[in-house]
């Protein structure tokens, strides 16, 4: 029963989150200085002037700019739940169409980056925690350094070193497998440093627990203790952080796509911000919000799988 | 073994702290009096020496108009640091408002604000910032607003927690019992005590804000290129990335160095002041 209730609460808050995000994007669209129809007309004709009421009438009619704000708001929010994200100002087609095809490359990029970051973080933690002063400080220094590197700089350095100088990878990768390596590393390296710092702290504490000593007295090998007993505990906080990490990954993806000329919502987003195409910007913000909500539900599930104590509750 | 590690742990950061202080002092000097560190104008065009690799005459090389990159980086410090400070200040003003309201205005308000903050905190900061830029159009002021608004939710959460903790303290009760009005109690007792641990957090925030603002310029959505703000330098250098690596790598090294130095100073401050705010 309590479990059902927890799921219900989660579902309701998820909807609240989406509606809250939608309210923010809706009022952001209203907050653009100047008359929206006039701005739109200028965008579409490439001119910069004040249009007459008659000239703007079709636009006002089409986008419903003359309706009371509350009506526009309700239209917008109910539209969202029907899968309608509005119409792009510059491309004059539904935002869902503009974003649709770009979503998969971005998801591939962030998903792969999350996996690689986890592999890097766990690998480095397993190898360097409590392994003597030299290895340990090597590990902590690497983590502290990479965790504070901005995405764009990691991307640029990787690009210069591996694409321009060594020519191992293409400079403009597109969505090919080879071209995906550098963007993934761009996102994964700083994230791995961050996750590593968290798992390391936890790992050190768990290594001092009585059950670790017990396992060792049973004659278990050091690696066995680390993998079978300690790892499970140490990754709990990092799983919680993965939900948060998704936010950092999305921010990073916008930058990585930009550096490597990789198609994706990041590219669309930067263009849309540049042309002040607010429906498209809002649409992307909302799609990301939805993905974020789903991801956090998944994190809850993952938590229950790793920590059996939660399954009983 | 434990004593050994402890003494090392105390000694090592000192070197780091001194180095960080040097870096920060250099940047502050560059921001206040750039002429002291370099002579020559950051926009002096020299078409005879375009895209030259780093040398003694041009330690950071030159760009496509023959402008000395080191001079440009030094002169860019004012804008970068200014954005960092401005954005952090704005973020704190918003965060103090939200955090204190949430902590003091009763359960319903608290629940509402806390929920919104939780969502906004986890939401990609870059997307919030880009939404602000889409509304206002790119400029220096927009960069400050975008980064400030993007980073406010995190601080607001910490401030709320601090206020809730300090409110329990005996001296608050004592002040109220002495008959001081609620405003006086907040101003004289609650505010200073709740905010003290956040001094270190604010220091960390300046470093992060500089990085975020430069990311916006890097995307071409921050301060526009004639400026030598560090992110704008990176953006301008991208055209020549296949031939002139220094235009891209070296300003990046400066940003990373400054960010790491400010972070390490913030951490030191946090340890000194005690009570890590989370």
Image (spheres, coloured by chain):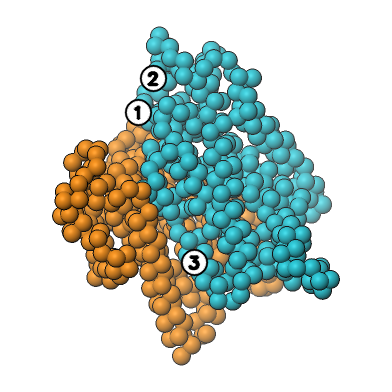
Chain B colour is cyan
The orange one among the chains is A
Which residue shows up at 29% across the image and 50% down it? A35
Q: Is circle 1 on the same chain as circle 3?
A: yes
Give yes or no for contact between labels 1 and 2 (Cβ–Cβ under 8 Å).
yes
Relative to the observer, which residue lies in front, A234 or A6? A6
Q: Mark 3 — on which chain does it sit?
A: B
**Residue B264: image location, x then y, percent:** 66, 44
Q: Which residue is mark 3?
A: B116
Quarter of the figure with residue A166: top left
Which residue shows up at 43% across the image and 86% down it? A4
For label 1, count other residues whose C-alpha is less than 10 Å away and answer few (under 14), some (14-19) or many (20+): few
Q: Would residue B25 be found to the left or right of residue B239 on screen? A: right
Mark number, residue B64 = 2
SS at mark 1 in the image? helix
Earlier residue among tags 1 and 2: 2
Earlier residue among tags 1 and 3: 3
Q: How many marks?
A: 3
Which residue shows up at 45% across the image and 80% down it? A9
Q: CA distance from mark 1 to mark 2?
A: 9 Å
Earlier residue among tags 3 and 2: 2
Give yes or no for contact between labels 1 and 3 (Cβ–Cβ under 8 Å).
no
Residue at the limit of the structure toward the front, as seen here: A53
Q: Which residue is mark 1?
A: B239
Is B145 located above or below residue B94 in the figure? above
Q: Mark 1 — on which chain does it sit?
A: B
């Amino acid at each position: 029963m309590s479990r059902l209730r927890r799921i219900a609460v989660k579902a309701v808050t998820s909807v609240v989150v989406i509606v809250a995000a939608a309210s923010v994007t809706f009022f952001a669209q209203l907050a653009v200085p100047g008359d929206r129809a006039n701005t739109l007309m200028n965008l579409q004709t490439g001119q910069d002037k004040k249009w007459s009421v008659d000239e703007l009438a079709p636009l006002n009619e089409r986008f419903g700019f003359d309706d009371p704000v509350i009506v526009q708001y309700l239209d917008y929010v109910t539209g969202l739940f029907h899968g309608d994200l509005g119409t792009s100002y510059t491309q004059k087609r539904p935002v869902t169409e503009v974003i649709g095809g770009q979503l998969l490359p971005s998801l591939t990029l962030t998903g792969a980056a999350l996996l690689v970051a986890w592999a890097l973080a766990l690998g480095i933690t397993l190898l360097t925690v409590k392994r003597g002063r030299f290895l340990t400080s090597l590990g902590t220094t690497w983590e502290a350094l990479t965790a504070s590197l901005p995405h764009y700089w990691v991307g640029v350095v990787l690009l210069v070193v591996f694409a321009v100088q060594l020519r191992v990878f293409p400079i403009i990768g597109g969505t090919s497998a080879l071209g995906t390596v550098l963007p993934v590393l761009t996102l994964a390296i700083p994230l791995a440093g961050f996750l590593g710092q968290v798992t390391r702290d936890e790992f050190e504490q768990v290594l001092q627990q009585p059950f670790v000593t017990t396992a060792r007295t049973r004659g278990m090998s050091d690696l066995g203790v680390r993998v079978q007993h300690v790892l499970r505990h140490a990754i709990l906080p990092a799983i919680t952080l993965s939900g948060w990490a998704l936010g950092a990954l999305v921010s990073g993806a916008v930058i990585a796509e930009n550096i490597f000329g990789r198609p994706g919502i990041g590219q669309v987003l930067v263009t849309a911000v540049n042309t002040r195409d607010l429906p498209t910007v809002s649409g992307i913000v909302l799609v990301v919000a939805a993905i974020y909500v789903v991801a956090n539900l998944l994190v809850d599930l993952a938590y229950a799988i790793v920590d059996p104590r939660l399954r009983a509750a | 073994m434990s004593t050994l590690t402890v003494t090392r742990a105390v000694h090592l950061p000192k070197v780091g702290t001194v180095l960080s202080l040097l870096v920060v002092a250099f940047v502050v000097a560059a921001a206040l009096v750039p002429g002291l560190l370099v002579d020559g104008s950051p926009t002096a065009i020299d078409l005879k020496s375009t895209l030259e690799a780093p040398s003694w005459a041009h330690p950071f090389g030159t760009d496509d108009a023959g402008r000395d990159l080191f001079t440009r980086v030094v002169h860019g410090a004012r804008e970068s640091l200014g954005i960092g400070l401005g954005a952090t200040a704005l973020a704190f003003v918003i965060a103090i408002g939200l955090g204190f309201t949430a902590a003091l205005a009763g359960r319903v308000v608290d629940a509402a604000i806390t929920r919104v903050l939780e969502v906004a905190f986890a939401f990609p900061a870059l997307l919030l910032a880009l939404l602000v830029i889409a509304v206002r159009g790119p400029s220096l002021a927009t960069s400050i607003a975008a980064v400030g608004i993007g980073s406010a939710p995190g601080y607001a959460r910490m401030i709320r927690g601090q206020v809730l903790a300090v409110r329990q303290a005996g001296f608050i009760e004592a002040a109220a019992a002495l008959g001081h009005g609620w405003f006086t109690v907040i101003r004289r007792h609650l505010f200073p005590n709740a905010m003290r641990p956040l001094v270190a957090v604010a220091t960390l925030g300046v470093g992060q804000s500089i990085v975020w603002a430069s990311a916006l310029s890097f995307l071409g959505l921050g301060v526009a290129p004639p400026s030598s703000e560090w992110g704008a330098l990176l953006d301008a250098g991208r055209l020549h990335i296949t031939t002139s690596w220094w235009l891209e790598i070296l300003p990046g090294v400066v940003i990373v160095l400054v960010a790491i130095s400010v972070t390490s100073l913030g951490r030191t401050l946090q340890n000194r002041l005690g009570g890590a705010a989370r």
